[in-house]
C-alpha cells in the first residue's frame, strides 16, 4: 500500500500514514496538499525547498482556485483546468467542487464532458485511471492485481466508450466520462476518492474519424465483437471480483447491444449498476410518480409514450412500468398504457428483427389497425400521441426538435398537466426546447430535460427547467451499496432510491414549481438515497455487514468522505 488511512470509531479520517518520499508525495494527488503542507509535515518529509515558504490554509487556496477558474474563457478550458487541479490535489478539487456545485457539475460532467471526450486525444496531458486493452488482455489480471496492492478499491467505474452520451463511439476518449461520473459520485455522495478506480476497456473503435486521426490514443482497429468481446468482458469481471471483493461495479456508456446483456449476465454475481439503463430510469420514474401524485391523478389516467426506444428509452420504460405495477395495477392493465416509437415509427409486434428489449412494449397490429393513420408501416409520433391519448411523453432519440408544436399542443389537449421529458443530450440533440414546451402548453407541461436549460420567462412568471440529472440518484445508490458492502443491486433497492428522490420534488408544494429540486440539493438527496438503499439492502439480506435496518444511517455516514486535509505522518 502506498499509504494507510487511519479512522476513528465513527469512521472519521484522523490521519494518513505513508512511507513515500517528498517527490512521490507531491506527485500523489490524494496525499498532495500543495502550499497547505504544515511546517511539521514539511520537516518530516523533507518538503522544505520543494514548495514556496508560505504555509497556506485551504481557504486561501480556494480563493486562488476560484479566481483562476473564473479567468477561463469557456467551459472546455474550465474542464481542463479542473481536471488538472483534480490530478494534482484531489482534496482541494473536491472542496472547491462541493462549494461551487452549480458551476462545477456542468463543467466536469454533462454537457461539457461530451466536448472533453471528443477532444480527449488532442488534449491528452497525463493518464488517469486504468486502460485495459483487448490487444494486451493477457496483462489484464496483472494490471488489476497491481492496483489492488496499491490501495483498497471499493468502487470501479468502467466504460468501453461505444455510446458516449448522445455523441456515439469515442473509443478511448470514454475515459473522460468515467472520470467525470466518478467526480459526481464523490462530490454528491462523498464516495472516498482513495478507494475508486476508473477503467477504460479499449476494444477498438468504429469511429472513422478516430481511426484516421494520427493523434488518436486508443487501439486503431474496429471494435471487437461477438464471443471475443463477451470473453473479454468475462475476464474483466472475473479479475475485478478476484482482486476487489465487495466491489461496486458501475457500467458507463456501453453500446445498446451490450449494455443490457452485460447487466443481465452479471447482476446476480456482484453489486453492479448501469446508469444509462437504470439511473435515468429512476429519475424519470421519480418524476412520473411526483407528477401523478402532485396533480392528484391516478396511474390509470395515464398513457406513456417513449420516442427513441434504445438503451436509455427502454430502461426508463421498464422502471415506469414497474412503478405502474407497484401502484396496484395488473401487468396486463399496465401494458395497455405503454407505447414505444423508434426509427420505423410505432413499434408493432409484426415488425421484423425487433430487439428483445423492445418486444415487451410492441403493440398488437390488430389494435392499431383501427387507428386513423397515414401509413400503417410507419405510424408517427403525432399519430400515436393523438390515437393513444398520451399523457406522458419522453424522448431518448437524439432527434433535435422531434417534439414539435402539433405534438405538444396535442399532449395538452389529452390531459390538463402533460408530462414531457425531452432527455436526449447534448442540448443540440434534445427533442424540444423547454421554452417552446412552456409557450405551446400555456405553462401546463411538467418538464424535465436531459441537460441544463435556462429558466423560462412566460406571462410574467419565471419557470425553472428541471434537468433529469442522474446525479440525483447514482451517487446515493453507490454510497448506500458501498456502506453495507451490498452483494447485489436489487429492484427494491432501486425502488427505494426512486421514492426517496420523488419525496423531494418541489412540485408537491406547487404545480408551478419544477419537478426536480435544484442540483445543489443533490448532496442532501444523495445521503437520503444512500440511507434508503442501505436500509433496503439490510432488509433483503443483501448486506455483507452484520447490521439492523436502524444502523443504515450510521453506516452511510461512516462511509462518507469529506474533502478536508488531515495530518500526514510517517509510517
Ligand atoms: P441509443 O442509441 O441506445 O438509443 C437511441 C434510440 O433512438 C435508438 O433506438 C434509435 O434507433 C432511436 N432513434 C434514432 N433516430 C430516431 C428517429 N428519427 N425516430 C425514432 N427513434 C429514433 O442511445 P441511448 O443510450 O438510449 O441514449 C439516447 C439519448 O438519451 C442520448 O442523447 C443520451 O444522452 C440520452 N440520455 C439522457 C440521460 C439523462 O437525461 N439523464 C441518461 C441517459 C441517456
Image (cartoon, rainbow, N blue to C red):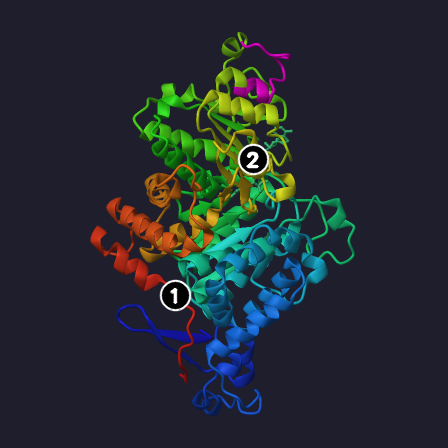
Residue picked out by circle 2: 396
> On the image, which quarter does residue 561 sit in?
bottom left
Residue picked out by circle 1: 561
Magenta region's main secondary structure?
Answer: loop
Q: Which residues are magenta?
A: 371-385
Instruction: Name the one closer to the observer, 145 or 465.
Output: 465
**In the image, what residue occupies the spot 40% across and 75% down?**
4
Query: Mark 2 or mark 1, which is nearer the start of the sequence?
Result: 2
In the shown orientation, is residue 252 left or right of residue 77?
A: left
Rendered position, 539 above or below 14: above
Rendered position, 57 above or below 492: below
Label 1 close to label 2 by CB (< 8 Å)? no
Specify whether residue 200 is in view: no
Q: Residues within 10 Å of mark 2 (few under 14, many from 20)?
A: many
State yes or no: Cβ of the residue under disc 2 lies below 8 Å from any atom of ligand 1. Answer: yes
**In the image, what residue occupies the spot 66% across and 62% down?**
77
Q: Secondary structure at mark 2?
A: loop
Residue 145, label in figure: none
Instruction: Name the one closer to the observer, 343 or 293.
Output: 293
**In the image, what residue occupies the spot 30% across and 52% down?**
531
Check if residue 570 falls in the magenta segment. Answer: no
Q: Which x, y percent locates residue 403?
A: 59, 30
Q: Secondary structure at mark 1?
A: loop
Q: Which x, y percent locates residue 484?
A: 31, 55
Taking the image in four quarters, ligand 1 sits in the one at top right
Specify whether residue 551 is in view: yes
> Which residue extends farthest front?
460
Amino acid at each position: 500500500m502506498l499509504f494507510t488511512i487511519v479512522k476513528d470509531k465513527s469512521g472519521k479520517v484522523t490521519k494518513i500514514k505513508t512511507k513515500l518520499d517528498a517527490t512521490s508525495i507531491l506527485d500523489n494527488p490524494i496525499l498532495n496538499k500543495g502550499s497547505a503542507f504544515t511546517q511539521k509535515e514539511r520537516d518530516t518529509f523533507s518538503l522544505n525547498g520543494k514548495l514556496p515558504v508560505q504555509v497556506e490554509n485551504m481557504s486561501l487556496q480556494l480563493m486562488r482556485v476560484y479566481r483562476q477558474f473564473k479567468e477561463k474563457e469557456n467551459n472546455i478550458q474550465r474542464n481542463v483546468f479542473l481536471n488538472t487541479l483534480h490530478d494534482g490535489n484531489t482534496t482541494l478539487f473536491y472542496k472547491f467542487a462541493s462549494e461551487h456545485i452549480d458551476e462545477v457539475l456542468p463543467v466536469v460532467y454533462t454537457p461539457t464532458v461530451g466536448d472533453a471526450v471528443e477532444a480527449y486525444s488532442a488534449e491528452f496531458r497525463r493518464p488517469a485511471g486504468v486502460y485495459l486493452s483487448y490487444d494486451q488482455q493477457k496483462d489484464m489480471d496483472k494490471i488489476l492485481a497491481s492496483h489492488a496492492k496499491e490501495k483498497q478499491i471499493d468502487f470501479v467505474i468502467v466504460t468501453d466508450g461505444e455510446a458516449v452520451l448522445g455523441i456515439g463511439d469515442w473509443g478511448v476518449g470514454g475515459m473522460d466520462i468515467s472520470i467525470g461520473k466518478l467526480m459526481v459520485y464523490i462530490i454528491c455522495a462523498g464516495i472516498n476518492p482513495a478507494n475508486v478506480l476508473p477503467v477504460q476497456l479499449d476494444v477498438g473503435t468504429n469511429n472513422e474519424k478516430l481511426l484516421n486521426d494520427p493523434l488518436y490514443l486508443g487501439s486503431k482497429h474496429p471494435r471487437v465483437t461477438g464471443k471475443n468481446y463477451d470473453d473479454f468482458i468475462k475476464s474483466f469481471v472475473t479479475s475485478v471480483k478476484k482482486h476487489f471483493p465487495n466491489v461496486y461495479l458501475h457500467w458507463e456508456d456501453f453500446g445498446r447491444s451490450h449494455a443490457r446483456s452485460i447487466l443481465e449476465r452479471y447482476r446476480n454475481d456482484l453489486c453492479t449498476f448501469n446508469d444509462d439503463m437504470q439511473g435515468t430510469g429512476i429519475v424519470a420514474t421519480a418524476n412520473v410518480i411526483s407528477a401523478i401524485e402532485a396533480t392528484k391523478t391516478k396511474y390509470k389516467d395515464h398513457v406513456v409514450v417513449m420516442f427513441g426506444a434504445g438503451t436509455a428509452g427502454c430502461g426508463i420504460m421498464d422502471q415506469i412500468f414497474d412503478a405502474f405495477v407497484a401502484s396496484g395495477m395488473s401487468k396486463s392493465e399496465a401494458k395497455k398504457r405503454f407505447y414505444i416509437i423508434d426509427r420505423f415509427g410505432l413499434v408493432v409486434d409484426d415488425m421484423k428483427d425487433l430487439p428483445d428489449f423492445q418486444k415487451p412494449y410492441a403493440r398488437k397490429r390488430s389494435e392499431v389497425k383501427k387507428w386513423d393513420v397515414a401509413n400503417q408501416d410507419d405510424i408517427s409520433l403525432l399519430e400515436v400521441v393523438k390515437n393513444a391519448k398520451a399523457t406522458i411523453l419522453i424522448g431518448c432519440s437524439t432527434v433535435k426538435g422531434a417534439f414539435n408544436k402539433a405534438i405538444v399542443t396535442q399532449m395538452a389537449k389529452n390531459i390538463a398537466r402533460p408530462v414531457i421529458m425531452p432527455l436526449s443530450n447534448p442540448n443540440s440533440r434534445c427533442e424540444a426546447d423547454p421554452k417552446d414546451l412552456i409557450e405551446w402548453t400555456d405553462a401546463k407541461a411538467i418538464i424535465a430535460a436531459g441537460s441544463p436549460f435556462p429558466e423560462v420567462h412566460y406571462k410574467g412568471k419565471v419557470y425553472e427547467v428541471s434537468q433529469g440529472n442522474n446525479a440525483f440518484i447514482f451517487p446515493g445508490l453507490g454510497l448506500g451499496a458501498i456502506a453495507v458492502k451490498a452483494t447485489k443491486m436489487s429492484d427494491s433497492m432501486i425502488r427505494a432510491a426512486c421514492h426517496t428522490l420523488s419525496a423531494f420534488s418541489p412540485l408537491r408544494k406547487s404545480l408551478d414549481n419544477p419537478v426536480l429540486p435544484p442540483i445543489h440539493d443533490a448532496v442532501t438527496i444523495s445521503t437520503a438515497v444512500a440511507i434508503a438503499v442501505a436500509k433496503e439492502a439490510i432488509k433483503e439480506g443483501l448486506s455483507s455487514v452484520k447490521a439492523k435496518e436502524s444502523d443504515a444511517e450510521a453506516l452511510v455516514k461512516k462511509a462518507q468522505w469529506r474533502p478536508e486535509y488531515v495530518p500526514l505522518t510517517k509510517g
